[in-house]
Amino acid sequence: MPTRITVVHYSATGNVTRLARAIAEGATEAGADVRLRRVPETAPDDAVAANPAWSAHRAAVEAEDGIPIASLDDLAWADGIALGAPTRFGLPAAQLKQFLDQTGGLWAAGTFSNKVVTAFTAASTTHGGLESTVLALLNTAYHWGAVILPLGYTDPVVFRTGNPYGTSWVARSGSTPDDDALAAARHQGRRLTRVAGALAATAEPR
Ligand SMILES: Cc1cc2nc3c(=O)[nH]c(=O)nc-3n(C[C@H](O)[C@H](O)[C@H](O)COP(=O)(O)O)c2cc1C
């Protein structure tokens, strides 16, 4: 049975979605059955409308062939989970936190104890909180009792992208993730699949 990977993320202007797609591609390359998901927008419509990049991205992900909304089942189903959100004042965007805060029932049932969790982000400045955002996302995984999977320098590309905590992109002047960032994300997806698959193989048959 293929390893099950869920990539769940929030993105306002598309950078984290680009990384999420690359993580999903890497997981697929490694043989996983992959669910790429987004969490609902919770910002007021007028805030979204005031930012053309935000409204364009929202329209794209809500289009007919866009990315489905995440459900709690997408988390329960998975052997491995990648969590992604943009950096907001050094922390993950609240939209993803709102979704994670609905996992109390799964947490109480011990659902996450044999799952592997990794994280990724985008910000606009090098020292603007990439690492603190990834670490904050993973705080939830500690409480879940999941196995935390760092990116580490487990592929040469991380020596160029520079963040062993998790794939990240610095969107200077509106730039979008470059080839190295996307390669790091694909590697993170492959690595998540390998580790989550190995752990799932030790669990009771499903
Ligand atoms: C309210 C708000 C707070 C932000 N806070 C930070 C921050 O603390 N550090 C930083 O480098 N960038 C910050 N940014 C920039 C975003 O993290 C950056 O544009 C990111 O690439 C957006 O990702 P997305 O395209 O997936 O939405 C902030 C943006 C907004 C709108």
Image: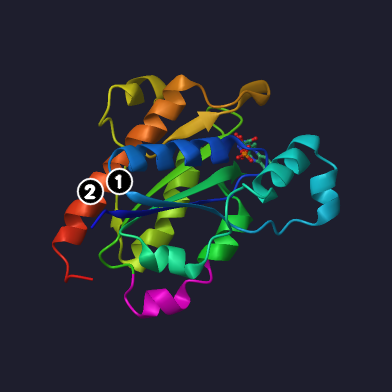
Q: Assess mark 2: CB under 8 A from ligand 1? A: no
The reply to whether residue 206 is visible in this rendering is yes
Disc 2 marks a residue whose amino acid type is Val
* Residue placed furthest toward the front: 64
Label 1, on which residue? 192
Quadrant housing the N terminus: bottom left
Mark count: 2
The reply to whether residue 129 is visible in this rendering is no
- Element class at badge 1: helix
Look at the image and give the residue range highlighted in magenta.
101-111
Quadrant housing the C terminus: bottom left
**Which image quadrant for residue 165?**
top left
Q: Are marks 2 and 1 in contact (CB under 8 Å)?
A: yes
Residue drawn at the location 31% of the way across and 62% of the way down: 146
- Residue 10 in the image: state x and y as whole percent: 58, 50
Q: Is residue 102 magenta?
A: yes
Front residue (pair 55, 29): 29
Compared with 127, 45 (above or below) is: below
Mark 2 Cα shell of 10 Å, populated few (<14), some (14-19), many (≥20): some
Q: In the shown orientation, is residue 201 left or right of residue 142?
A: left
Q: Which label belongs to residue 195?
A: 2
Q: Is residue 137 magenta?
A: no
